[in-house]
C-alpha cells in the first residue's frame, strides 16, 4: 500500500478501493486542497472512488478551502464519509449537508466501521 504524505494529510488507497484521507491537524487552504486532491488522483489513476475523510484531527478550513473542495470533490469522489469528533464536527458546520444535497453522497460518522460500510455501498 502506497501512502502519499503532504503537509496536511496522509492519503492511501486500501485493498477495497476506498481512499483514506487523514488530516494531520493542519487547517485547510485552497492550495492544500489542490495538492491533496492531486495525490488522490495519482493513487486512483484519476478514477472516481469512495473517500473516507478522517477529520478527527482537523481544526478547520478557510473559506477558500471550502470553495475549492466543493468545486473539485465530485471529480475524484463517488461518495464521502467523514470521521469526526465533537470539535471537528463543529468545524465542518453545514458543509456536509450542502455537499450531500448538491454534489455527492456525503455523510458524517463517529464510527469508522459504519463509515466504511456506507462507502462500500457506493462502489
Image (tube, grey):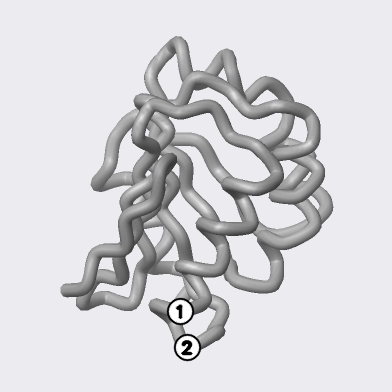
Identify the residue under disc 1. Answer: 42
How crowded is the residue under tag 2: few (<14 C-alpha within 10 Å), some, or many (20+)? few
Q: Mark 1 touching mark 2, by CB under 8 A? A: yes
Q: Which residue is drawn at the image coordinates 64% and 57% (left, top)?
A: 34
Q: In this view, does 6 lie to the left or right of 94?
A: left
Picture quarter with the C terminus: bottom left
Q: How many marks?
A: 2
Image coordinates for residue 79, horizontal then vertical, percent: 56, 62
Name the residue nearer the viewer: 23 or 93. Answer: 23
Picture quarter with the N terminus: bottom left
Q: Which residue is drawn at the image coordinates 81% and 43% (left, top)?
A: 67
Whether 60 is drawn above or below 123: the answer is above
Q: Residue 80 carries which label?
A: none
Q: Quadrant of residue 105?
A: bottom right
Q: Which residue is drawn at the image coordinates 70% and 66% (left, top)?
A: 74
Identify the residue under disc 2. Answer: 45
Image coordinates for residue 52, horizontal then vertical, percent: 41, 53
Whether 41 is drawn above or below 62: the answer is below
Whether 74 is drawn above or below 45: the answer is above
**Which SS class for mark 1?**
helix
**Which SS class for mark 2?**
loop
Image coordinates for residue 12, horizontal then vertical, percent: 30, 64
Amino acid at each position: 500500500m502506497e501512502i502519499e504524505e503532504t503537509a496536511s494529510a496522509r492519503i492511501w488507497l486500501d485493498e477495497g478501493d476506498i481512499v483514506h484521507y487523514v488530516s494531520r491537524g493542519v487547517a485547510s487552504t485552497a492550495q492544500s486542497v489542490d495538492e491533496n486532491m492531486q495525490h488522490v488522483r495519482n493513487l486512483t489513476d484519476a478514477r472516481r472512488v469512495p473517500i473516507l475523510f478522517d477529520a478527527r484531527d482537523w481544526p478547520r478550513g478557510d473559506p477558500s478551502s471550502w470553495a475549492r473542495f466543493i468545486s473539485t470533490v465530485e471529480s475524484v469522489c463517488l461518495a464521502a464519509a467523514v470521521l469526526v469528533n465533537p470539535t471537528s464536527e463543529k468545524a465542518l458546520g453545514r458543509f456536509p449537508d450542502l455537499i450531500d444535497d448538491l454534489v455527492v453522497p456525503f455523510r458524517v460518522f463517529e464510527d469508522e466501521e459504519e463509515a466504511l460500510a456506507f462507502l462500500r455501498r457506493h462502489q
